[in-house]
Image (cartoon, rainbow, N blue to C red):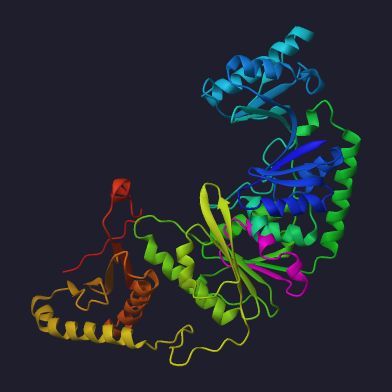
Amino acid sequence: MKFIATCPKGIESLLADELAALGAESVKLMPTGVAFEGELVQAYRACLWSRLANRVLLPILETNVETADDLYSAIQRVHWSDHLDPSMSLAISFTGKTQSINHTHFGALKVKDAIVDQLREITGERPGVDRENPDLRIHAHIYGGKLNVSIDLSGESLHRRGYRTQAGAAPLKENLAAALLTRAGWPALSDDSPVLFDPMCGSGTLLIEGAWMAADIAPGILRDRFGFEHWKQHDAALWENLKEEAEQRRINGLTAFKVKVYGADEDERMLDVTLSNAERAGVDHLIKVHEAQVQRMVRPCEENGLFITNPPYGERLGESSELMFLYRDLGDTLKQEFGGWKAGIFTGNPELCEAVGLKTDKTYRLNNGPIDSRLFLYTLYANRIAKEGQPSEQAGDVALSETAQMFANRLRKNLKNLNKWRKQNDIQGYRLYDADIPEFAVAVDVYKDWVHVQEYAAPKSIDKIKAFDRLKDVLAAIPGALGVDPLRVVLKQRKRQTGTQQYEKQGTGRRFFQIA
C-alpha cells in the first residue's frame, strides 16, 4: 500500500527518518511531506507514533482533470462503497484549481456530489456531511491539471495530541516543538546531559514533548479517535494490539525515566497552564516550574543539559529594541550560567539572534505556520573567560563601558546646567538630552522620578547590533547618572510609521501621576 504523510515545511527529512524507523519502506521526500509504502500496520504506526506528521493519507485516485464534469466523472470511478456506508458522514477537503475549477468550495461540492450520487444509486440512501467530526475525511487536490484523491487516515491533524486545552499568545504546534527538539539532538543528548530546560515555557509544549520523547510515550496515545476508525477497511484487532503495545511502552518508559525537566516563565499564570497541560499528558510529576525573568535566570541543577526556547519575535510598534534586550539577556544568561550545555533558540526574526552574541553550531530553517523561522543551535563551553578589557555583566555589577561613561558624563553636565532653572521654577518635567552626541540618537525626558527614553530609529545603513549596543549603554548609564531606579526608566522607539502601524494601541494600562 502507498501512503503520504504531510508535515510542516522544513522537517520533511526528519519525518522521512522517523517513518523509516517505524518500519516504512520506499520512503521518498515530497514538497508537501513524505511518501512511503508498507502494510496497513505501517500507516497505523505512523498515526500513533509520528511526532512530526500532520496527516497520514491513503491515495486512492490519480488522474488528469480540467473541467467540473471531468472532476465529477473521475470521482465516480472510485468504488466508494469500499470505503463508507451511506449511514456514515463525510467531509471533503479540496485544494488547488484549474481554469474551469477556480474555487475550492465549488471543487469540494463537486467531489461530494459525485460520492453521494454514487452511493444513493447503489443503496437508495446517501451519507451526510459533517465538517467538524465526520466518520471519514476525503482529501482532493489539483495541481497542474493532476487530481489526487486520498482517504485521511489521521482524521484531525496529528499535532493535536489531546493534552493541550490551554495555550499562550503564540503557542508552538506540538509537532513543530518535537521537530525543534529532534534537531537539537533530543532525546539522544539526555544520555550524557539528562536535563531539559525552557526558560520561557509558555504553555509547556517543548517541556511536555521533550518528556514524552524521553519516556517513549506515543504522541497519539491520548487522542479520542483517528480517521481510520470508521473507515470500512479498518482492522480493529490490529489497532488494539498497537495501542496495547504503546501503553506498555509508556509504563516502561515512565518507570525508567531519569531525565530532569524544568520550565520557567515570568508570567505565573502560564506556569499554571503548563502544569495543567502536563497533568493531562501524564507527566506533571516529571516537570518542575518556577517564576523567573530571563535576566535573573540560573541553571536549574548541577548537571548539563539542553536549554531550548521559543522567545517572542513580534514586530509591533516599539518592540524592536525591547526584543533586542531580551535576546541579549538570553545570550548573557547562557554565557554566565550554562557552560557545558547545548542550547537552541527558535525565532521568526533571525536578525534578533545577532544580539545573542554567541557563535552558532548550526542553523535550521523551519516554518512556524506562515512564518519563515530559524532554529539556532549553540554549544556553551564551560569556564568561559571574559574578554580582556570587557566590563563584567554579572548581575548587580554597575561598571560602565567607556562609551556608556561618556554618555553618563553628558547627562550629568546637562543636569547641572538645568539645575538653577529647575529649582527657581519648580520644574519636574523637562527634556534633559536630545541627540546631543551623534552616537547616542535618543531623547531623554525626566518626569519627576521617572525617565522616558525615546530611541530615534537608526538608518538602515547603520549596523543594528552596533545601534543596539549604544542603546544598551544609554540604559546602563541613566540610573547612576540621574540617581533613579532602573525600573523607572521607560524605553520607546521613534520611527516613521506606515499603514495600520501608526494606529496601533500601545497598551491598556491606565496609570497616571501628576507633575509640575
| Residue 464 vertical placement versus 8 (above, below) | below
Q: What residue is at 32 percent from the left and 77 percent from the top?
A: 474
Q: Is residue 430 left or right of residue 40?
A: left
| Residue 49 vertical placement versus 479 (above, below) | above
Q: Is residue 479 left or right of residue 186?
A: left
Q: Position of residue 130 (x, y in %)?
A: 65, 24
Can residue 221 be seen from the camera position used here? no
Q: Position of residue 447 (x, y in %)?
A: 23, 71
Q: Toward which corner of the image does residue 320 lie, by quadrant?
A: bottom left
Quarter the C terminus occupies: bottom left
Which residue range is magenta in the image? 181-206
Q: Toward which corner of the image does residue 420 lie, by quadrant?
A: bottom left
Is residue 295 within the magenta segment?
Answer: no
Q: Toward which corner of the image does residue 339 lie, by quadrant?
A: bottom right
Q: Is residue 239 left or right of residue 120?
A: right
**Residue 302 versus residue 317: which sits nearer the camera?**
317
Q: Is residue 416 left or right of residue 157?
A: left
Q: What residue is at 22 percent from the left and 79 percent from the top?
A: 437
| Residue 274 vertical placement versus 124 (above, below) | below
Q: Position of residue 214 (x, y in %)?
A: 77, 62
Q: Position of residue 497 (x, y in %)?
A: 28, 53
How many tags in the picture? Answer: 0
Can residue 14 be seen from the camera position used here? yes
**Residue 422 versus residue 25: which sits nearer the camera?**
25
Quarter the N terminus occupies: top right
